[in-house]
Image (tube, helix red, strand yellow):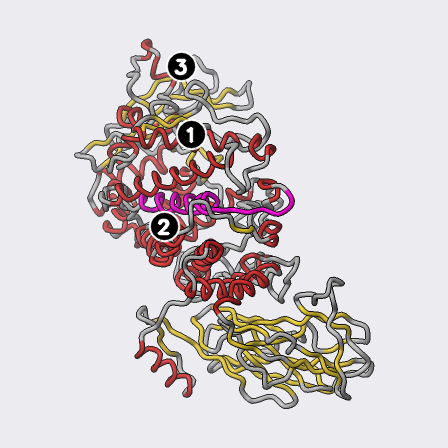
């Protein structure tokens, strides 16, 4: 694990405060650290911890080691000022989150008849050894887990399993003259003790040991060894490649990033603090939590009692599939979801992420965007990118079989031995640069907005803008506890985008960075694709033919994007990505659904609100229109729009159903209100795919072909996929929107 270096005085403070069991502050960012200690000291055994000083919410491992003849009965945890808890756990490793100074106690009791115990020599230094069981019957195969300190590893031949009566128990062999790793043995008919010695590795040995640990899925140890090996030999291609990959991966376990993903922003119910648990590799190295954390915490629906309102109803859980982008673990049957709901879970996840952001950032999303740029794509990321650049252009590095298996890379490279090089690493770096470019693009605009009223009443995950606004405006009449929010004109101004700074330019200079990163990302990924699809690549592996056939659309799409961005042209793309099947292709200009003018797209201010919708009152209010429509009752009540609309030029009445559509028998009301889209600007950005409303093209209606309604151009907001964005009824929300945008009297706000 790569850790930030704390200041010298902070280290001294940590050491001093540990002795007196008070929270301490660490590092230049002054994080609160909590101490963990074994107290009272247990009889007939001892405890060790993966860390004794951690920030709040960090999961630590507690290792229990009994004396021969004893087994663990229970572990107790006592927080400062709290009552001890007794976790139900009788295995050598126990993991728990730490949120205060914590005393850990353990009770060891004599073993049961017929059991034989496995103990570890308490004098072992510079590393940790623990078996996967503390007691078992004769003939049981027990794995021995090895966790060396940074830069250390086992002394060859020093790991022994000794019977209490004397004599060694043989370690299991792989049949080829080597030991099975992780090491294993068969329990004899008496108690045993494990002994081992660790030594500081020579620079020449670091890389080989790192490969060994990576081969069995011990990613954290491999990461540490590769980094140390690279520092000793920064010109070795294998060390450059693997240390770069791990340097990027370790960003996930940086405390600031874990806070960003967890309770600090996105409310993931648990965020691993080590790579082993992030990867969830349970084939070679199960550990105790690896492969389980996302299942164990997926059902969490609790929001802490001290969370300030508004609360979200579900905290974001972990990935069910660690390396896929779906499915995500979410609960059904809660009051925020429909019982038995089978809609795509990716959309649920996106929506819940959005609610989490609203809950975490009350004044808008600028702080979140800035945190991502600083914490995820900060110094460590820049150093990893710089390191990747030093890899030789003709590097040929063995791809570790464990990584190939865990990430299903056989479908790209085929079976057998594989070597990778500069282009493979650049493809990974390029994709990450593109993500950074997206956040830099977002930082151009101001995302100031206060959406608290949207969470003051029950709003389901797939509510449309109609329902959300209706609930918001209902608060002033039906929710005494919150209606004072609407009496405060400054609150109203923070909610309504055109009354605050929402989507105004915040940092125009960031656009150059965004374009540079996205251009650099496309250059890297395209170079990799050209290499993988070429016929002359030396000994470095290419994509196998089936992978080339099924992913040709990706190669074509990346090439089209790079050509458009570098040449200032138009990039054409589909509504949905082509499927990864043989014969799939990226659409051409004539077959694509959309086209984006890259020059306009990378112009600061292209997506300000005044460029998205037409406005009045000096750009402070959106132009509102009333649309004629009726229900086709002979066809499942499908709404039919007549093509007629009229601008709203005065306060709306409360009736809303006073007008009938001529020629219909059902007396349907006008009852639909919407904004007008700035078609001139959007047509310049999207020369294809931006369609003005169909009925605006009919000269008989007097419609202007250069005008379009928001409800027709954008029939749904992506965050709420199935709900219309136009406003039904005249009382709410159209009436209230008009009042708040056009009136400033306190009487209007409070009546």
Tell me the residue that label 2 is attached to. 453
Camera-side mark, 2 or 1 = 1
User: In the displayed structure, would residue 113 be above or below residue 686?
Assistant: below
Q: Position of residue 348 (x, y in %)?
A: 51, 45
Front residue of 39/335: it is 39
Per the model, the C-alpha gap separating discs 3 and 2 is 39 Å
Q: Earlier along the polypeptide chain: callout 1 or callout 3?
A: 3
Front residue of 404/477: it is 404
Per the model, the C-alpha gap separating discs 1 and 3 is 25 Å
Label 1 crowding class (10 Å Cα cut-off): few <14, some 14-19, many 20+?
Answer: some
Local SS, label 3: loop
Residue found 73% across the figure and 62% down from its top? 176
Q: Which residues are magenta?
A: 415-442
Q: Earlier along the polypeptide chain: callout 3 or callout 2?
A: 2
Q: Position of residue 2 (x, y in %)?
A: 43, 65
Tell me if residue 267 can be seen.
no
Per the model, the C-alpha gap separating discs 2 and 1 is 24 Å
Q: Position of residue 161 (x, y in %)?
A: 71, 79
Camera-side mark, 1 or 3 = 1
Q: Residue furthest top?
A: 700
Q: Earlier along the polypeptide chain: callout 2 or callout 1?
A: 2
Camera-side mark, 3 or 2 = 2
Query: Which mark, residue 715?
Result: 1
**Dot 3 and dot 2 residues touching (CB under 8 Å):** no
Tell me the residue that label 3 is attached to. 662
How many numbered markers are drawn?
3
Front residue of 538/436: it is 538
Query: Which of the 4 image quadrants contains residue 146?
Result: bottom right
Asked if residue 470 lies left or right of residue 51, the reply is left
**Dot 1 and dot 3 residues touching (CB under 8 Å):** no
Front residue of 324/537: it is 537
């Amino acid at each position: 694990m790569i850790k930030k270096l704390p200041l010298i005085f902070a280290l001294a403070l940590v050491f001093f405060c540990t002795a007196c069991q008070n929270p301490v502050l660490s590092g230049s960012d002054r994080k609160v650290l909590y101490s963990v200690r074994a107290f009272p000291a247990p009889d007939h055994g001892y405890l060790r911890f993966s860390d004794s000083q951690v920030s709040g919410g960090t999961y630590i491992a507690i290792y229990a080691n009994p004396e021969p003849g004893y087994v663990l009965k229970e572990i107790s945890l006592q927080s400062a000022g709290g009552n001890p808890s007794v976790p139900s756990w009788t295995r050598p490793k126990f993991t728990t989150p730490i949120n205060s100074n914590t005393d850990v106690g353990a009770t060891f009791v004599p073993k049961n008849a017929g059991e034989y115990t496995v103990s570890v020599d308490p004098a072992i230094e510079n590393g940790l050894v623990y078996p996967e069981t503390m007691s078992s019957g004769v003939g049981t195969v027990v794995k021995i887990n090895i966790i060396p300190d940074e830069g250390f590893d086992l002394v060859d031949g020093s790991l022994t399993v000794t019977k209490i009566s004397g004599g060694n128990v043989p370690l299991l062999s792989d049949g080829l003259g080597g030991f099975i790793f992780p090491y294993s043995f068969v329990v004899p008919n008496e108690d045993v003790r494990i002994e081992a010695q660790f030594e500081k590795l020579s620079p020449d040995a670091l890389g080989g040991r790192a490969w060994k640990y990576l081969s069995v899925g011990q990613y954290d140890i491999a990461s540490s060894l590769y980094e140390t090996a690279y520092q000793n030999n920064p010109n070795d291609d294998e060390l450059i490649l693997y240390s770069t990959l791990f340097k990027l991966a370790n960003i996930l376990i940086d405390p600031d990033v874990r806070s960003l993903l967890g309770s600090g922003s996105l409310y993931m119910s648990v965020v691993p603090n080590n790579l082993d648990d992030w990867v969830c590799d349970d084939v070679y190295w199960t550990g105790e939590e690896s492969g389980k954390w996302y299942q164990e915490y997926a059902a969490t629906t609790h929001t802490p009692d001290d969370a300030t309102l508004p609360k979200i109803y579900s905290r974001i859980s972990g990935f069910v599939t660690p390396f896929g982008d779906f499915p995500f673990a979410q609960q059904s049957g809660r009051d925020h979801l429909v019982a038995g709901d089978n809609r795509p879970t990716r959309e649920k996840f996106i929506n819940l992420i959005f609610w989490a952001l609203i809950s975490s950032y009350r004044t808008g999303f600028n702080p979140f965007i800035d945190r991502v740029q600083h914490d995820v794509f900060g110094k460590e990321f820049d150093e990893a990118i710089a390191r990747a650049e030093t890899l030789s252009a003709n590097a040929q590095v063995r791809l570790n079989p464990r990584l190939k298996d865990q990430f299903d890379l056989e479908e790209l490279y085929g079976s057998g031995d594989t070597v990778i090089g500069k282009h493979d690493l650049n493809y990974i770096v390029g994709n990450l640069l593109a993500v950074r470019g997206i956040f830099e693009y977002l930082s151009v605009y101001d995302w100031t907005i206060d959406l608290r009223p949207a969470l003051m009443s029950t709003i389901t995950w797939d509510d449309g803008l109609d329902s959300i606004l209706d609930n918001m405006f209902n608060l002033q009449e039906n929710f005494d506890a919150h209606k004072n929010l609407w009496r405060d004109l400054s609150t109203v101004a923070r909610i309504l985008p055109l009354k605050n700074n929402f989507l105004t330019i915040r940092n125009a200079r960031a656009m150059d960075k965004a374009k540079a990163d996205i251009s650099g990302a496309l250059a890297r990924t395209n170079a990799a694709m050209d290499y993988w699809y070429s016929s002359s690549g030396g000994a470095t592996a290419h994509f196998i033919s089936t992978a080339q056939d099924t992913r040709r659309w990706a190669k074509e799409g990346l090439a089209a994007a790079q050509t458009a961005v570098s040449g200032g042209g138009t990039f054409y793309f589909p509504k949905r990505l082509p499927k990864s099947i043989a014969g799939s292709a990226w659409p051409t200009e004539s077959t694509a659904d959309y086209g984006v003018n890259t020059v306009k797209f990378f112009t600061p201010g292209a997506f300000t609100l005044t460029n998205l919708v037409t406005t009045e009152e000096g750009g402070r209010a959106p132009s509102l229109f009333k649309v004629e429509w009726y229900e086709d009752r002979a066809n499942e009540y499908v709404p039919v729009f007549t093509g007629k609309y009229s601008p709203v030029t005065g306060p709306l009445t409360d009736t809303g159903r006073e007008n009938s559509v001529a020629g219909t028998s059902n007396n349907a009301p006008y009852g639909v209100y919407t904004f007008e889209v700035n078609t001139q600007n959007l047509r310049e950005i999207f020369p294809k795919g931006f369609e003005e409303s169909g009925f605006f093209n009919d000269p008989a209606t007097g419609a202007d072909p250069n005008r379009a309604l928001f409800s027709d151009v954008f029939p749904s907001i992506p965050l709420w996929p199935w709900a219309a964005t136009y406003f039904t009824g005249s009382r709410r929300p159209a009436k209230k929107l008009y009042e708040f945008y056009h009136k400033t009297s306190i009487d209007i706000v409070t009546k």
